[in-house]
Every structure is written in C-alpha cells, then in structure tokens.
Amino acid sequence: MGRGQQTIIADIGSLREETITLYHGTSSIHWPQISSQGLPARSYLTDDLSLAEYYAGVAAEDGEEIVLEVQAPKTSLVTDVPALEEPIFVTYAANNNGKDRQETLWEEADRACLEAAVENWQDLPWAISLELTNSVLCCSKISPSDIKLYYQ
C-alpha cells in the first residue's frame, strides 16, 4: 500500500471517532457555570487555538480570558453558517503607502464554486465548515466531563 493510501485510511478512521477535540473561548465569569453544567447547545467551537483566544478576548469584558478544550460529539456538529456568510478579513502590513490592506480569506472563485454546489450553507458538512472557517456549531449540550480548562 502506498503512502497516500495509508493517509486516506488514517483520515477515514479519524472520521469514525465519536468525538473531536475543539476549543471554546469565553470569560472566566462563565467558568463556574460551565464547569458544573457544561456548555449549552448551540455553542460555537473551533479547531484553531488563536481563534478561540480571539473569542475569549471578545467575551472577557468583565473577566479574564479563558480557553476551554472540549470533546465534542461529531454527530452534533453542524456548519457555522454565520462564519460562511460573513467575509473574514486578514490585515496585512504592506508597503502600500504606509497603509495596511485587508484581504478576504475567501477567494471569490472558491466561494462561487461552493455556493453553486450547495443550495443552503446548512447542507454543507461540518468538516468542510471546520476546514474553511475553523469553526462549527455544536447543537447539543456538552457535558462538564467533556470540558477542561485549557488555559486561563
């Protein structure tokens, strides 16, 4: 069996696992409730630690930033539709007369191809959402036993 075939088999095997490790950024104010009751259904999760840190910063107006490591049930994950509908921008420092320029992570051709292939963003598999936006929505409650404080 060639090397490429082994990789494909390993990837298929990982899709069969029941949970996936993802992150959730929030405020320390919410930690007591999350640690005792879990994360509520409809929580957004990411596989990108820097994105979780960003969301922790947004959430932590009245507390400290925390990032949670979550074992999320794959059967409860769906596409993060708002992340797909909103343009995601990255700011690049450029020699553009001293101005930064912003570029969308979505290439227009890629977005057009996806929109042509999928009638509704909700129909897009969660794994593609995670690959494109590093974000998914978990439709079920996540038990406290499946959550740990990654860092505070």
Image: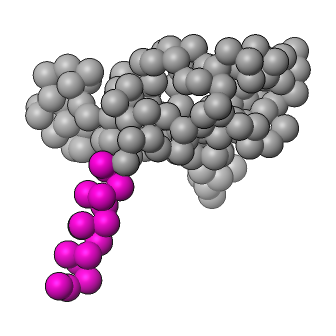
The residue stretch that appears in magenta: 1-16
Coloured how? one colour
Tell me the residue at 31%/50% (across/down).
15
Coordinates of residue 76 in the picture (x, y in percent): 38, 26
Relative to the observer, which residue lies in front, 94 or 146?
146
- Left or right of residue 142, residue 121 in this image: left
Tell me the residue at 37%/48% (across/down).
17
Q: Is residue 86 visible?
A: no
| Quadrant in the rendering for residue 22 | top right
Q: Residue furthest right?
A: 63
Query: Up-down: is 152 above or below 131?
Result: above
Query: Up-down: is 77 above or below 134?
Result: above
Number of on-image labels = 0
Magenta span: predominant SS is: helix
| Quadrant in the rendering for residue 24 | top right
Q: Is residue 4 visible?
A: yes
Coordinates of residue 30 in the picture (x, y in percent): 77, 17
- Left or right of residue 143, residue 12 in this image: left
Coordinates of residue 21 in the picture (x, y in percent): 53, 45
Tell me the residue at 53%/31% (across/down).
45
Q: Residue furthest front?
A: 145
Coordinates of residue 67 in the picture (x, y in percent): 72, 36
| Quadrant in the rendering for residue 151 | top right
The answer to if 137 sits in the magenta stretch is no
Report the quarter where the C terminus lies: top right
- Left or right of residue 87, residue 35 in this image: right
The answer to if 6 sits in the magenta stretch is yes
Report the quarter where the N terminus lies: bottom left
Relative to the observer, which residue lies in front, 29 or 131?
29
Tell me the residue at 13%/22% (across/down).
119
